Structures are given as structure tokens and as C-alpha cells.
């Protein structure tokens, strides 16, 4: 069945979409829950049980397999509560009539459902007449989940390491697999072979004879090669990737996975052109794998979806991505941080977001995962971090330990943002006796890391007035650069009107096209990489820079052809091309030095 909407709400942080499906799925909107923080999920499960007068039995960390059980219980609760809201909508009482009208008002004007509804209610709104039609035609949005594949910490009981299936990502996968939710598992942050192999243990990920899959696999990727490699790997295990979610390498929120200079437009073009080949090649691997496992063989080739996200901000961009690249849905992330009807963000952070400008939104190195991370200057978690540094006690107390992945000093792992790790790292640096300038640079890199696994979830606790005694009040926030152009709190009608071109909520006239913005971010990234080169650069590093430049040039030439009649786009493209030419001169100068 076709999507009710042509947009979806991607996962944002740890807590910002933690209960989005409960807020929007009954209106037909797909959204994604992060499964990183089972502690936060358990707190919200208790809250929603109390609100709904449902029995609640705490799942403590003394319970065997508590992480998976917490996740299963939370997802089942959200599924049940969302289903109740949806069924109440379809029953069509006088009380639900405003919600019914809302369901249809936020649909695109091109929607067949919307046209049919308007036709049936043109002269009057007879609840009894429309009730049966609603039951047959309304659909819920999907309650999807996200697992960052590399956030797969080993776990211990009394210093004894538990089997791999109790690792964090494995337990999260099991929690989702055992839930009643039929939706999609979105895997992000690259391939984790052990985790991917573990998916084989659960029947819901395999197709029936009609090709239906209860729990679908979605890969978040930033290039075609990665999609092909991961898709084939999973197919060899009898697992089908139902959707490839293509995200801009740098023009996105949260962690940024830069490509080797490949830009979003050319990447989407390749996916469009290679979609059938991708599907056929992977399906040819899937069938013998299913046969070996004695699994059901679907009667027809399984469908795949292509979706895209990262920096989309206008109806024109939305429609262009949908129509030119033939994708099934477009992700709108950061703007929804200003939509309380859809996401969960505390008021103080919302206020900061509404006033944020380009310079307030930056690509940082604060993530303990060692991956570039979009952040907002002045967020309260960074203020807290700075206070600890001034006190001479850099680092976090690390109350949740979800990214305790570094094993330099401890076999069970430490988080690089933790006080313990930074203390040990600084002591080791002092013993090296490096020159003062080098020491200061390395010291700054050590203390730069921030406790994001706590900070990205705290906002939900503050928004609902729940205790933050363990976590503290510091909030990390991870909006993409596009946030600078959205400057007011919106309701669902306003944001969907904007997405579908019925109104414009962006007051500024200087917002660049999403492709131009992405190119500019890549040029800044490229400049930083050039500045890092020196006479000790390896041939591999030099080759990387040359490849990066050539891919940017190819992308620019692609855009010249694609937007040959769009004067404003070409004007912005010419400016960025001039910057690349300047950087190329600097790079060539470095290369000449290398040859001397």
C-alpha cells in the first residue's frame, strides 16, 4: 500500500522522537524511535502507564535480560496506545470528528484519500455514513525503530563478560524482534557483521510466500556502494532489505558520515538508475539462501523502497526529490524539533532552536563515537562540560555508559567523554613529555568530548517533568544546518502545509538550495582536511584528497547539467565552484611540496 504521506520523521537524537509514534502514527505519519537508552524507555513506560491507568511492574537492572525486556515492553505499550487512538479515530464519534478532519487536512492536496473524503463530506459531515469508509481506508503510520549498529557495548555481571547476544545493540534487536510491532528496523552507522548475523534468529524478518515481512530491514546509507555491500551481506543470510534510506553525508542532523566527496544529487541519481539492478542482484542471492535455510520462498521478487533525507526544507525541494529521483518518501528531521505535536523537546531547548543562526549550528568533534556530530552552540550539556573543565575535573560521571567502547585503559570499556577516561588519557599524555603546543592541542581534543548518550535523552525527561537526578539537567541537541531557517514553534497543520506547498513558514529570503548548502559544508570539510596535511602525509591520505576533489568536481558538473535553466541555483553553484578552485590551488601546492 502506498504511503499516506510523502514524508517521514527520522530518528532524532535519543529522546526527541522517543514517543513520536504515539503522537503522530494515528494520523498516518511514519516516525522512528531510538533504542539506545532502555533506562529512558522504562521511565516513559512508567509515565504512560500512570497516565493511561494501566498496571506497571518495573523492569529493574537486576532482571535477567532487562534491556531487551524494557524495549519490548515499551514498544508494546506504544503500539497499544497508538492503536487505541487510531481505532477511536475510525469509530467516528462527535468527539473524534475534529481529529478526523485533522487527519485529512494535513494530507497533500494530491492525495486520493483527501479528495474522496472532501467529496463525501462536501455538503455535510454525516458520521454514520462515513464510518464504514473510514474503517476501510484509513491507515496508521509506521512505528519504526532505529539501532546504531556500532553502539554495541559488551556487558558484564560481576566482572564476567556476558555472551555477545547481551551486547547493547544485540539486546535492542531482540527487544524489537520480540515486540508486537510490525514495522521497520532502521540500521544506521555502518555494518556490524555480528549484529546482522543475529537477525537470522528471528522469524519475523523473513518473508512469507506473498512477500510480506512482519519486521522489515531498512539500511540508512550515504552512498550506493555501502548499500550494495550491506544488502548482499544480509541477502546471503536470507534477509531482505526492504528500504534503502539515503541520507546526506553532511547536510543532516546528528552524526555525520561524510562520503569521499560524493554529493547527494549524484548519489540519488545512481540509486534511481541502479534500483532495478540492485533489486535483481540481491534477490538472486536471497533465494538460494532461503532455500538453504528451508524458509518460505516468496512467489515474486520482493519490492524495495528508496527514501531520502538530509537538509530538505521547502516544498519545491521535497517535490523535486520525490519526482526526479523517484523516491518513495522524503525525511524531514530538524524542522520537526519545533513541532511539539510530533517531537519531545524541553521548552528551553526549543527556545534556543528558534533563535539559532548558521554560526550557532556547527559540525563538532564532541561525540564519544569519534564521528563528526552536528551540535548547537550554548547547549546546556556543553555548558555543564565547560564548568567541569574549569573546576579541573573534565569529563562526565558517565551514569549510563552506553558508549563505553574504548578499551585503551579498561577491558570492559570506557566512554571517551567520561571523567575516568579523560583523567587516564591526560595522565598518559603528561608522561609522553610532548612540547607545550602539541600538548595543548592533544589536551583540547581529549576534553572536547561530551556525554551525548545522556544529553540527547534528558530533554524528554525535562519536557515531561520527570526526575533527572541521575542524569543531571544538561541537554545535548543535534539539529542539522537547515535549522537556521526555521524560527518559530509550529503545529502539525503548519509544518505539513509547508511541506506540501500550501504555505511557507520560512521568513528568510537567503536560504540556499539544499544541494548548494551540502556542497558548501563539504567544501568546509575539504578545507579542514587539506589544512591537516603536512610533509608527513601518507600516499593514502594524498590519494584521498585528490579523489575527494575530483568527486566534488563531478558533482558540480552534474548540477550544472541538471539545473542548466535555473539561474539562482547556478549563481550559488558558481560561488561554490570558485571556492573549490581556490582549495584546489592550495592542495596542488601541498602536492608539489610532497614531491620535492
Image (spheres, rainbow, N blue to C red):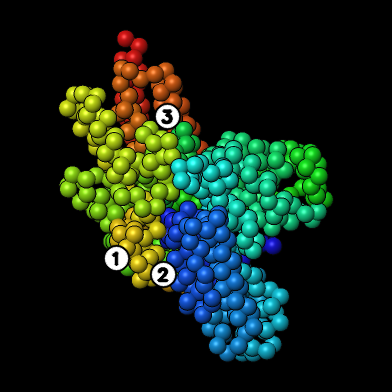
Using the numbered discs, state the Cα–Cα distance from disc 2 to disc 3 in whole angstroms.
41 Å
Q: Residue at position x 23%, y 26% from top?
A: 431
Quadrant that contains the N terminus:
bottom right
Can you give x and y, in whole percent of width and height, for residue 22 in the image? 52, 69
Using the numbered discs, state the Cα–Cα distance from disc 1 to disc 3 in whole angstroms.
41 Å
Using the numbered discs, state the Cα–Cα distance from disc 1 to disc 2 in whole angstroms.
13 Å
Q: Residue at position x 54%, y 64% from top?
A: 74
Q: Earlier in the sequence, mark 1 or mark 3?
A: 1
The answer to whether residue 456 is seen in the rendering is yes
Read off the residue under disc 3: 549
Read off the residue under disc 2: 340
Can you give x and y, in whole percent of width and height, for residue 183 in the image? 63, 59
Read off the residue under disc 1: 348
Q: Which mark is residue 180?
A: none
Q: Earlier in the sequence, mark 1 or mark 2?
A: 2
Q: Residue furthest front?
A: 158
Question: Label 2 neighbourhood size at 10 Å, few (<14), some (14-19), many (20+)?
Answer: many
> Which secondary structure, mark 3?
helix
Closer to the camera, 233 or 529? 233
Q: Earlier in the sequence, mark 2 or mark 3?
A: 2
Please state if 148 lies on the left or on the right of 436 as rendered: right
Q: Are marks 1 and 3 in contact (CB under 8 Å)?
A: no
Amino acid at each position: 500500500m502506498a504511503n499516506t504521506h510523502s514524508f517521514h520523521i527520522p530518528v532524532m537524537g535519543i529522546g526527541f522522537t522517543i514517543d513520536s509514534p504515539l503522537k503522530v502514527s494515528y494520523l498516518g505519519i511514519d516516525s522512528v524511535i531510538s533504542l539506545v537508552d532502555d533506562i529512558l524507555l522504562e521511565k516513559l513506560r512508567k509515565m504512560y502507564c500512570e497516565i493511561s491507568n494501566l498496571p506497571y511492574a518495573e523492569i529493574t537492572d537486576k532482571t535477567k535480560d532487562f534491556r531487551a525486556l524494557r524495549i519490548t515492553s515499551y514498544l508494546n505499550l506504544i503500539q497499544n496506545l497508538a492503536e487505541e487512538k487510531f481505532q477511536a479515530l475510525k469509530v467516528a464519534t462527535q468527539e473524534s470528528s475534529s481529529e478526523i478532519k485533522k487527519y485529512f487536512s494535513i494530507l497533500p492536496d494530491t492525495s486520493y484519500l483527501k479528495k474522496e473524503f472532501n467529496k463525501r463530506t462536501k455538503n455535510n459531515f454525516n458520521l454514520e455514513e462515513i464510518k464504514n469508509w473510514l474503517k476501510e481506508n484509513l491507515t496508521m503510520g509506521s512505528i519504526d525503530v532505529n539501532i546504531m549498529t556500532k553502539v554495541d557495548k559488551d556487558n558484564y555481571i560481576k566482572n564476567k563478560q556476558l555472551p555477545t547476544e547481551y551486547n547493547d545493540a544485540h539486546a535492542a534487536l531482540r527487544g524489537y524482534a520480540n515486540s508486537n510491532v510490525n514495522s521497520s528496523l532502521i540500521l544506521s552507522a555502518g555494518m556490524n557483521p555480528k549484529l546482522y548475523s543475529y537477525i537470522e534468529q528471528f522469524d519475523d524478518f523473513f518473508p512469507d510466500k506473498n512477500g510480506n515481512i512482519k519486521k522489515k530491514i531498512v539500511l540508512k546509507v550515504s552512498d550506493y556502494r555501502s548499500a550494495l555491500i550491506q544488502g548482499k551481506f544480509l541477502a546471503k543470510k536470507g534477509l531482505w532489505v526492504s528500504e534503502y534510506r539515503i541520507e546526506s553525508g553532511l547536510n543532516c542532523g546528528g552524526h555525520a558520515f561524510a562520503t569521499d566527496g560524493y554529493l547527494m544529487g549524484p548519489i540519488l541519481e545512481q540509486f534511481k538508475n541502479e534500483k532495478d539492478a540492485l533489486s535483481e542482484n540481491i534477490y538472486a542471492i536471497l533465494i538460494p539462501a532461503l532455500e538453504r535455510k528451508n524458509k518460505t520462498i516468496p512467489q515474486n521478487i520482493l519490492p524495495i523502497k528508496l527514501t531520502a533525507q538530509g537538509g530538505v526544507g521547502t516544498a519545491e525541494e521535497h517535490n523535486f526529490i520525490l519526482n526526479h529521483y523517484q523516491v518513495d518518501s522524503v525525511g524531514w528531521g530538524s524542522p520537526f524539533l519545533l513541532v511539539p505535536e510530533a517531537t519531545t523537546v524541553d521548552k528551553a531547548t526549543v527556545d534556543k532552536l528558534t533563535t539559532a543562526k548558521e554560526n550557532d549550528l556547527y559540525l563538532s568533534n564532541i561525540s564519544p563515537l569519534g564521528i563528526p556530530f552536528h551540535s548547537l552552540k550554548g547547549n546546556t550539556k556543553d555548558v555543564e562540560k565547560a564548568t567541569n573543565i574549569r573546576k579541573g575535573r573534565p569529563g562526565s560521571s558517565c551514569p549510563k555508559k552506553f558508549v563505553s567502547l574504548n578499551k585503551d585503559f579498561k577491558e570492559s570499556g570506557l566512554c571517551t567523554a567520561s571523567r575516568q577516561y579523560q583523567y587516564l588519557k591526560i595522565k598518559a599524555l603528561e608522561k609522553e613529555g610532548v612540547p607545550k603546543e602539541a600538548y595543548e592541542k592533544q589536551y583540547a581534543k581529549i576534553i572536547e568530548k561530551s556525554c551525548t548518550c545522556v544529553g540527547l535523552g534528558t530533554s524528554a525527561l525535562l519536557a515531561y517533568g520527570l526526575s533527572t537526578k541521575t542524569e543531571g539537567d544538561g541537554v545535548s541537541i543535534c539539529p542539522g544546518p537547515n535549522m537556521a531557517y526555521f524560527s518559530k514553534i509550529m503545529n502539525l497543520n503548519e509544518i505539513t502545509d509547508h511541506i506540501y506547498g500550501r504555505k511557507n513558514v520560512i521568513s528568510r529570503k537567503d536560504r540556499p538550495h539544499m544541494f548548494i548548502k551540502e556542497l558548501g559544508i563539504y567544501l568546509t570539510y575539504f578545507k579542514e582536511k587539506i589544512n591537516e596535511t603536512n610533509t608527513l602525509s601518507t600516499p593514502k591520505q594524498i590519494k584521498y584528497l585528490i579523489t575527494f576533489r575530483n568527486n566534488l568536481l563531478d558533482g558540480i558538473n552534474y548540477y550544472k547539467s541538471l539545473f542548466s535553466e535555473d539561474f539562482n541555483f547556478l549563481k550559488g553553484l558558481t560561488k561554490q565552484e570558485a571556492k573549490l578552485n581556490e582549495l584546489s590551488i592550495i592542495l596542488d601546492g601541498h602536492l608539489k611540496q610532497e614531491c620535492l
